[in-house]
Amino acid sequence: MAEADVKKFEELVAQAKDNLCLRVMAYFKDSDHSLKDQSLYLALTVDGLKWKALNKNNPVYTVEGIGSNLIRDPYIVKKADGTYLMIATDWTLYGAEKVHANHRLYDGSISKENSWDYETDNYWDVNTTCLIFADSPDMIHWSNPRQIQMVSDELKKEFYKNCGNYMHCWAPEVVFDTDENGCAKVIHVAKDGTEYRYGVIWSGDGEENGHRKISDDREYNETWVNWTNDFETFTPGEIYFANSSANIDASVLTDTAMTGSSEKKYYLFFKDQVEHQHGIGQVEASSLDSHSFDAAKDFSNVIYSKDKGNGDITKVTGSLYNEGEGPFAFRPYKDRNLWYLFVDCHDAHAEKVFGAFSSTDLKTWKSENDATEFPDGVIRHGSTVSVTLEEAISLVRAFGLENI
């Protein structure tokens, strides 16, 4: 069956011709809170719009030996050395009154706390400040799963004392860029002169002093970062992106240079949560360092945002949705000024949970919903990584491909 799928997949590749776009999407499911749903799923595309599930739309990797092994928001990055890293939200503490804190801290040490007390088992109020990491040479074989707390025990306890609950650490992604030789560029220099080539960004609640920025009766989120070169040890968590409203689910696009130009900016997409009006914001910067994206506080170039009077996603032609989160964007073809943006439209009362958009200038966007296909089920919070033809065939051979 696998070889038959490979042959059919190769036929799809041949049909794509000059429009070939080989990418893998990582996602999880949210029909319930089971281990099967909250594991790593993968889908493959040959055109950037139609996605077919690998492994019959079953998990390709389930974490073992870390709390309850539940993950959300999986993100896969291909590092400059050609290997893959998965980062995901840790959902260990859902439904737990106490969980032993045997996890590592960002600096490589073990948490000094033997247990944490949780006064609620509400699904959204029981959080860790940990992320889950795992490594792979090919997205088929995974190893070294690890749970790492991205802030100190002291900051976590200070936040609890001030705010009555624990900080959360959601929706991680990796920020980095490569030079003309394909090597990861230095994007952050610490005060001690240490150079860092990768940043892990994530959505957190509160400030670096353990407080919330606004009053304690209102959720306030900002994008945090820990800098690293090896994804084993990290700098202390610090604020990466802070704007005039609450924001989560930040995602950075680096492949942005217009055809024929070497000049490029970086674009950050995020979920604007001001008063729970869940629009997708877009800001630009010339650097990937901390606070580089903060300047655009006026939302002058939001894609949609209900609170700023710039319309919302329901007014985009062909769109079916009212709200969105978990954005990710990519360039399907290196030689064209074309970018796709996907949004997890969690409130969708329709067959397609993901909204899709395209742009030729990274300023104006139009709907691509009619051209998309997605795996069945309540798939959530996608991310995507480019693969070679050889890597794609290996994935199809290992897992099979749905509906080809």
Image: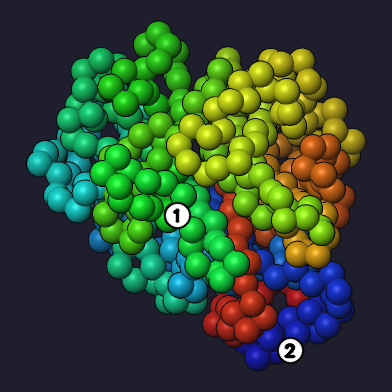
For the residues labelled 2 and 1, the Cα–Cα distance comes to: 42 Å
**Three-letter residue code for mark 2:** Lys
Residue at image position (38%, 53%) is 196
Please report the residue visible at 81 percent of the width from the left and 29 percent of the height from the top. 314
Q: Nearer the viewer, residue 324 or 94?
A: 324
Q: Which mark is residue 29?
A: none
- Seen in the image, is 117 located left or right of residue 302? left
Q: Nearer the viewer, mark 2 or mark 1?
A: 1
**Residue at 32% of width from left, 26% of height from top?**
208
**Which numbered tag is attached to residue 186?**
1
Residue 137: quadrant of the picture: bottom left
In the image, is residue 269 above or below residue 16?
A: above
Name the N-terminal-most of marks 2 and 1: 2
Point out the image quarter for the N terminus: bottom right
Q: Is residue 134 left or right of residue 312?
A: left
Give x and y (percent) for residue 115.
13, 38
Q: Would you call the spot at circle 2 few (<14 residues within 10 Å), some (14-19), or many (20 or more)?
A: some
Residue 390 at x, y = what percent?
63, 84
Cβ–Cβ below 8 Å for labels 2 and 1? no
Name which residue lies at 46% across and 25% down.
221
Look at the image and tell me in which quarter the C terminus lies: bottom right
The x and y percentages for residue 4 are: 70, 89
Q: Residues within 10 Å of mark 1 (few under 14, many from 20)?
A: some
The circle drawn on residue 7 is: 2
Residue 265 % position (x, y): 66, 44
Which secondary structure, mark 2? Answer: helix
- Tell me which amino acid carries mark 1: Val
Closer to the camera in the image, 231 or 258: 258
SS at mark 1 in the image: loop
Up-down: is 206 above or below 1?
above
Which image quadrant is residue 178 in? bottom right
In this orientation, does residue 51 appear? yes
